[in-house]
Amino acid sequence: MNTHTDVLFISHGGGPMPLLGDPGHREMVDTLADIAGKLRRPSAILVVSAHWEESVPTITAGTYPKLIYDYYGFPPESYEIQYPCPGEPELARQVAASLEQAGLQARLDYKRGFDHGLFVPLKLMYPEADIPCVQLSLVNTMDAKTHLAIGRALQALDYDNLLVIGSGFSFHNMRAFYSAVSPEDGARNQAFEAWLEETCGDASMPESQRIERLVHWDQAPYARFCHPREEHLLPLHVCYGLAGKASDAHMSARIIGKMSGMYYWRVGAGSESLAAGR
């Protein structure tokens, strides 16, 4: 990739709660704002959301996608949130072409809107809603290798100053979020986070070993406690597949009482660290 791309996996919190002043999301809100302040302002944003699954990778291609309030039981204001960012049909077409060139069937969707995996974190990071956005689905087989391959296919994108966000959650056990806090659960959470940080961030690890660990992520310590279902982890696989190297930065935030990780990679021309800023 000869163009500049920032790649970021984020833990996006619980539904609209980060936008409602929930104290359990304060660290996450501050972390995302800090990251946005250090990144170069992107020309466009491609979001891989944990909240969209299709039989093949599918890309929003509308000019002004509406919002999908895909959460339930929250206050009325949760369903009045606005994030009127434009779509970017040309980027959508490039994403589809890159996937197809890699032998992956892809589909453009001109009607689907943006779900909260996109608009909640982006409202925190870029509240002006003036950066064009495109959303990419997961594949509903939940196969780790497939999502690594999707990321590798995105290396063919020729779109300068792109920000790719994997919007998921490094810990996603809904029952554990809302049950009584226990030392055992905390230890399980910490053990998986430590494994994930080593897997993504150890620059001395051969890429073949990193890939093997991500393919067999469910063999990590307490993997299935932290992810009874893997849809919130797989956006990270897409991010790593695109970057193909150890992460350049790791950030951690306590969200709803659980330690959660975020990872950053700088890819392509003019590579430098996140801390270098804009």
Image (cartoon, rainbow, N blue to C red):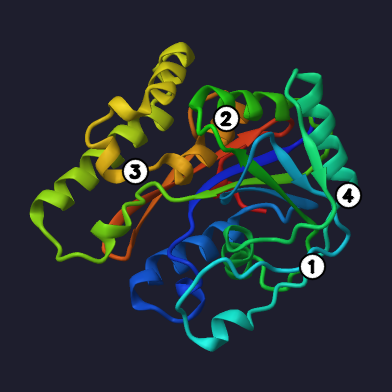
Which numbered marker is on residue 96?
Answer: none
Earlier in the chain: of badge 4 and badge 1, it is 4
For numbered disc 3, what is the local secondary structure? loop
Q: Quadrant of residue 218?
A: top left
Earlier in the chain: of badge 4 and badge 2, it is 4
Front residue (pair 38, 75) = 75
Q: Can you name the residue that lies furthest to the front here? A: 55
Callouts 4 and 3 close, C-beta under 8 Å? no
Callouts 4 and 1 close, C-beta under 8 Å? no
Q: Which residue is mark 3?
A: 227
Which numbered marker is on residue 147?
Answer: 2
Earlier in the chain: of badge 2 and badge 3, it is 2
Within-10-Å neighbours for mark 3: few <14, some 14–19, many 20+: some
Q: Is residue 1 visible?
A: no
Relative to 278, 237 lies left or right: left
Residue 121 position (above or below residue 91): below
For numbered disc 4, what is the local secondary structure? helix
Q: Which residue is mark 4?
A: 89
